[in-house]
């Protein structure tokens, strides 16, 4: 079922989201839409799936002009969307979620046995296997993503728009999802893949459409593109160096000293330092204990033994508020689940940790506004006003709002867990510049990242973890993607897994 858009335009107030877009998507292919935030790719996907309605132009399905006025109408035509924010019922199992609204009934009663049988048949025919013996809230994000796909298939969807489906997945879960996408394509389904992750796009696509400022720049085959060529087309600028130049400090004085930190089965005997003006990366596979160590340092989780020193003094941190008071800031792994209040303003999100300082019976609005304005600018947030809700911002600007909030506390130690997750290429470069600038100004920076190029491109030192322990420390010319991978998959780990 070929899908075609002709001269499609869409405005949101004064903003032109789509400008006379023409595109043909062949049936039974994985067709990727890429571009910076605001390029129009998600808007186009939502128009095709009925979430938004076009202002002008037309959509053709199998050669016939169609009107898609709602998601229900789109689904009746075989088109659905899997959005970034999953829409599952957390307390129900996979089968209940898949058949929600289309259950088999005997009078007023749901025929649960029939639903179970239908679910098993669907998983067998699709090859998408997911546990059905627990609530979906207990499943991994990767398995929840599979439940969304199964729900689409149960409704006979032929065209599935996947909007940033890998943004919250681990490397291993992403690999599984890409296999699922290929399998669906081989079954004749059409996948419209909206993504910031150019490596995934090059790996899985049959065709790539590059968008910028609401217009299509070109559509091409993956074999005709490289990471740099995609970046140049998306941004309109030469790709150049992806990372700012490293300026290692000379014999930096230790700001953070971690000695023998241990927490149950999560990590043990963790010892390292981060000096003033230094960027140190914690690397390793998902589950190696990287984020858990960072959370323990920040006081988000307790630890059993060991000590944390800040500028030479042992500190007792039992809560993030204490960490902030001691000059420690942290960007959490998930900005939406752990970092931001999406429906509150940028101003409120930035000033939130400092309300005690900013209030004395009444809020000191002048001080708050001054703090917000200073750090709004320092983080490079692109928004019309600090009174805009955080939800209305792009992913990159949401991430910068977290940076602004952290910088407002004037920290001496800055911890960034997955600092560029779910942001576009342009925002990534801005965040890298920001982290490098913090280090140049003498701040100690600890980065946790699953992206090898990020680890290698940013860090002055790399500490590699596996199964809750430090197994390698790489410095200077020792730092390379192959060296990090080699340490992460060392014989010690394989022996541990085998046992």
Image (cartoon, grey):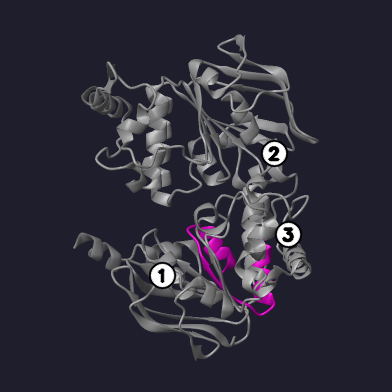
The residue pinned by badge 3 equals 380
**Residue displayed at 66% across by 65% down:** 351
| Residue 374, placed above or below residue 262 | above
On screen, residue 486 versus residue 333, left or right, reads: left
Q: Is residue 176 visible?
A: no
Q: Nearer the viewer, mark 2 or mark 1?
A: 1
On screen, residue 263 versus residue 216, left or right, reads: left
Q: Is residue 45 visible?
A: yes
Q: Quadrant of residue 97?
A: top left
The local secondary structure at tag 2 comes to: loop
The local secondary structure at tag 3 comes to: loop
The local secondary structure at tag 1 comes to: loop
The residue pinned by badge 2 equals 39
Residue placed furthest toward the left = 499
Q: Is residue 75 magenta?
A: no
The residue pinned by badge 1 equals 301
The earlier-in-sequence mark between 2 and 1 is: 2
Q: Residue 407, percent across and down?
A: 66, 70
């Amino acid at each position: 079922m070929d899908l075609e858009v002709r001269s499609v335009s869409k405005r949101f107030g004064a903003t032109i989201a789509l400008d006379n877009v023409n595109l043909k998507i062949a049936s039974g292919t994985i067709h990727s839409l890429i571009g910076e935030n605001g390029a129009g790719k998600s808007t186009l996907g939502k128009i095709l799936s009925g979430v938004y309605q076009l202002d002008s132009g037309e959509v053709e399905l199998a050669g016939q002009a169609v009107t898609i006025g709602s998601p229900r109408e789109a689904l009746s035509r075989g088109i659905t969307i899997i959005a970034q924010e999953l829409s599952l019922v957390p307390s129900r199992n996979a089968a209940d979620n898949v058949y929600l609204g289309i259950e088999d009934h005997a009078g007023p009663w749901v025929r649960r046995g029939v639903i179970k049988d239908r679910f098993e048949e669907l998983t067998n025919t699709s090859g998408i296997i997911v546990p059905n013996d627990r609530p979906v809230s207990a499943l991994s994000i990767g398995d929840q993503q599979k439940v969304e796909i199964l729900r689409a298939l149960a409704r006979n969807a032929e065209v599935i728009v996947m909007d940033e489906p890998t943004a919250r997945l681990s490397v291993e879960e992403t690999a599984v999802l890409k296999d699922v996408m290929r399998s669906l394509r081989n079954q004749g389904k059409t996948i419209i893949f909206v993504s910031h992750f150019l490596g995934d796009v090059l790996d899985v696509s049959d065709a790539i459409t590059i968008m910028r400022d609401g217009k299509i720049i070109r559509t091409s085959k993956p074999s005709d593109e490289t990471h740099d060529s995609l970046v140049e087309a998306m941004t309109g600028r030469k790709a150049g160096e992806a990372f700012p130049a490293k300026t290692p400090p000379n014999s930096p004085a230790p700001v953070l000293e971690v000695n023998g930190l241990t927490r149950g089965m999560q990590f043990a005997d963790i010892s390292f330092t981060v000096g003033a003006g230094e960027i140190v990366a914690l690397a390793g596979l998902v589950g190696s204990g990287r984020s858990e160590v960072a959370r323990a340092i920040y006081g988000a989780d307790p630890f059993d033994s060991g000590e944390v020193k800040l500028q030479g003094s042992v500190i007792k941190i039992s809560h993030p508020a204490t960490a902030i008071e001691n000059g420690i800031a942290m960007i959490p792994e998930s900005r939406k689940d752990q970092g931001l209040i999406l429906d509150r303003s940028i101003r409120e999100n930035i000033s939130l940790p400092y309300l005690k300082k900013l209030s004395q019976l009444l809020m000191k609005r002048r001080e708050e506004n001054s703090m917000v304005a200073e750090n709004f600018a320092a983080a490079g947030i692109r928004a019309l006003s600090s009174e805009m809700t955080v939800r209305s911002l792009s992913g990159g600007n949401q991430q910068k709002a977290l940076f602004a909030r952290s910088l407002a506390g004037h920290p001496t130690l800055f911890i960034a867990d997955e600092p560029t997750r779910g942001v576009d290429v342009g925002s990534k470069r801005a965040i890298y510049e920001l982290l490098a600038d913090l280090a140049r100004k003498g701040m100690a920076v600890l980065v946790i990242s699953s992206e090898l190029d990020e680890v290698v491109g940013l860090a002055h030192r790399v500490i590699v973890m596996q199964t809750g322990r430090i197994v390698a420390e790489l410095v200077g010319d020792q730092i390379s993607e192959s060296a990090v991978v080699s340490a992460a998959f060392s014989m010690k780990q394989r022996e541990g897994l085998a046992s």
